[in-house]
Amino acid sequence: MTTPDDDRERTVTRRLRAAGCVFAEDEARLLLAEAGDGPGLEAMVADRVAGRPLEQVLGWAAFAGRRIVVEPGVFVPRRRTELVLRQASAVLSTTDEAAGVPGGVASRPLAVLELCCGAAAVATTLAAEHPGLDLWATDLDPVAVHCARSNLGERGTVVRGDLFDGLPASLRGRVRLIAANAPYVPTDAIASMPPEARLHESPLALDGGADGLDLHRRIAAEVGDWLAPGGTLVLETSERQAAETQEALVAAGHRARIVRDDEIDGTVVVAVAR
Ligand SMILES: C[S@@+](CC[C@H](N)C(=O)[O-])C[C@H]1O[C@@H](n2cnc3c(N)ncnc32)[C@H](O)[C@@H]1O
């Protein structure tokens, strides 16, 4: 026997499938659960059918097992960025152990920063995994800054600025970890991205300049002023661009290695300030 709920789910699934959603059944279930008994379902389905990313329609994205608030226009945290999180978390665990501070760092003044934070998925997850951090996040886009504040709440400070520009000078030389997924798509490649990204994420979140590496070169040049001695930068890149990202950091005087996870198509460069 079919219930009215089954009928609703089937109808939504059919509409999503017709619009080209590959995981129409899963998406229908998520939309129905999010809408509940309220009146919002039709608007949500219409938005999704019109091509808005599922996460922006739901208002959240799953990231490393947690829900991250995603507001319209904000870059949707990708699964591959969980590699940034894992590497960053490993750095914090290692330095906590070395300092003999199991599970917490409140006694030490070194800071942790998510640069180009978007919704601040990495910072928010680090805050949950490593309580007591002096946590900062920054982004140039005011919409992203608003969204990052929704996610981090009291657990961190979010500022707006071009790369490091919005941060207080008191952080110079005392950041022990910087995690960043800055834009790295070459300008010409944006036109061939899926419409969900091209039309519903800010161009500022995607465009890395002619070869995609403008921001990486700027970060490489500036990061040394902010990292504490021995501090670490974890910077997302692509498999194809990784050697050049690494080279930019080595040229700026840092030790840098590439870490790759094929399963989630994640690539990062981990650089340590000398
Ligand atoms: C690829 S998105 C990544 C967002 C977030 N780190 C994540 O992984 O979900 C890049 C972010 O960098 C920000 N951004 C671009 N140029 C910037 C700049 N010059 N200074 C600071 N943030 C910038 C964008 O607004 C966007 O939120």
Image (cartoon, rainbow, N blue to C red):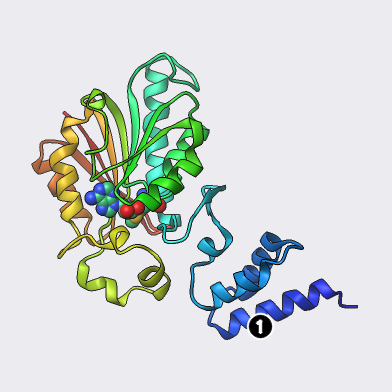
Instruction: Assign the N terminus to one quadrant of the image.
Output: bottom right
Locate residue 212: give its quadrant. bottom left
Point 49% across, 31% down: residue: 154
Instruction: Assign the C terminus to one quadrant of the image.
Output: top left
Name the spot of residue 158 as percent of width and height, x first.
Answer: 38, 38
Q: Residues within 10 Å of mark 1 (few under 14, many from 20)?
A: some
Q: Mark 1 sits on what residue?
A: 14
Relative to 4, does residue 134 appear above or below in the rendering?
Answer: above
Amino acid type shown at disc 1: Arg
Which residue is the extreme one toward the right?
A: 1
Say whether residue 28 is visible. Answer: yes
Name the spot of residue 261 as percent of width and height, x first.
Answer: 38, 53
Locate residue 223: give its quadrant. top left
Name the spot of residue 49 as percent of width and height, x first.
Answer: 55, 78
**Closer-to-camera residue (105/118):** 118
Say whether residue 22 is visible. Answer: no
Locate residue 156: give its quadrant. top left
Left of 262 or right of it: where is 10?
A: right
Q: Secondary structure at mark 1?
A: helix
Relative to 241, does residue 3 appear above or below in the rendering?
Answer: below
Point 34% across, 18% down: residue: 109
**Closer-to-camera residue (228/160):** 160
- How many discs mark residues in the rendered view? 1
Name the spot of residue 83 as percent of width and height, x first.
Answer: 40, 48
